[in-house]
């Protein structure tokens, strides 16, 4: 049996604990061993498994597998790279209510919550997370270390590059490209290409300066 170690010990980590308790992964036969956190956490006092160690100091043990539950994409990438450098292996967590076409391609460390729909030939690359009720049309491609929040809709052939945040209720029309390190604001309707490292918001979505 594998021992699942959840990286992080905040609210997002508690969500991933719940997901792990109700889902299957790339290695479905696991038990939840505990959490890793470099910051103080009260998660144990709330009835969850223990914080085992810091991410920095933890050494992967035999039968350990990992899932990264860090919302900040830059911290997620840094933490994943650290665990990978120590030889850690990551699994996917996929809620059983998700509808996933047999032609979908998933990377490693992918999380998919309840009621998501992934149509034909969708690709979701490594360490990307889909919150509940995300819908992706055929041939959508989402890169590495992305965060897609609830009720987002991607029409066919949308291409999302690495390190992109797509917030709740976003609509992206077919063939649109969202370049790396961009942020799409809550409820936006994206009609045109989103350039690298920009934030867009509105209907139609336009660049904003924060």
Image (spheres, rainbow, N blue to C red):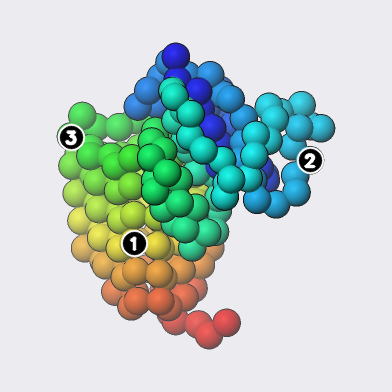
- Label 2 vs label 1, nearer the camera: 2
One can see residue 116 in this view: no
- Image point (47%, 75%), residue name: 199
How packed mark 1 is, by other alpha carbons closer than 10 Å (few <14, some 14-19, many 20 or more), is many
Front in this rendered view, residue 51 or 59: 59
Residue 3, percent from left and from top: 50, 23
- Which numbered circle lies on residue 148? none
In-image side of 193 versus 202 (left or right): left
**37 left or right of 156 in image:** right
Give the labeled residue for mark 3: 103
- Counting the numbered discs, the total is 3
Q: Is residue 53 above or below residue 182?
A: above
Question: Which secondary structure lies at badge 3?
Answer: loop
In the rendered image, the quadrant that contains the N terminus is top left
Q: Is residue 95 left or right of residue 135?
A: right
**Label 2: how many Cα within 10 Å (few below 14, some 14–19, many 20+):** few
Q: Report the quarter where the C terminus lies.
A: bottom right
Residue under numbered circle 2: 42
Q: Nearer the viewer, mark 3 or mark 1?
A: 1
The residue lying furthest to the right in this view is 45
Q: Earlier in the sequence, mark 2 or mark 1?
A: 2
Q: Which residue is pictured at 34% across the width and 61% down the height?
A: 162
Q: Secondary structure at mark 1?
A: loop
């Amino acid at each position: 049996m594998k021992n699942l170690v959840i990286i992080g010990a905040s609210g997002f980590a508690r969500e991933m604990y719940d997901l792990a308790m109700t889902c299957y992964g790339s290695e479905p036969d696991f038990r939840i061993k505990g959490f890793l956190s470099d910051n103080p956490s009260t998660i144990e006092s709330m009835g969850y498994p223990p914080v085992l160690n810091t991410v920095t100091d933890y050494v992967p043990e035999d039968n350990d597998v990992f899932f990264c539950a860090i919302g900040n994409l830059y911290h997620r990438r840094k933490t994943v790279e650290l665990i990978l450098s120590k030889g850690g292996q990551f699994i996917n967590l996929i809620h059983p209510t998700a509808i996933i076409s047999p032609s979908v391609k998933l990377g490693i460390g992918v999380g998919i919550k309840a009621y998501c729909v992934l149509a034909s030939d969708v690709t979701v690359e490594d360490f990307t997370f889909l919150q509940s009720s995300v819908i992706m049309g055929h041939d959508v491609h989402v890169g590495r270390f992305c965060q897609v929040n609830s009720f987002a809709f991607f029409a066919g052939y949308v291409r999302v590059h690495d390190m992109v945040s797509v917030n709740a209720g976003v609509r992206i029309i077919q063939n649109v490209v969202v370049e790396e390190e961009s942020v799409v604001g809550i409820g936006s309707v994206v009609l045109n290409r989103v350039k690298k490292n920009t934030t867009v918001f509105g209907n139609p979505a336009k660049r904003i300066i924060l």
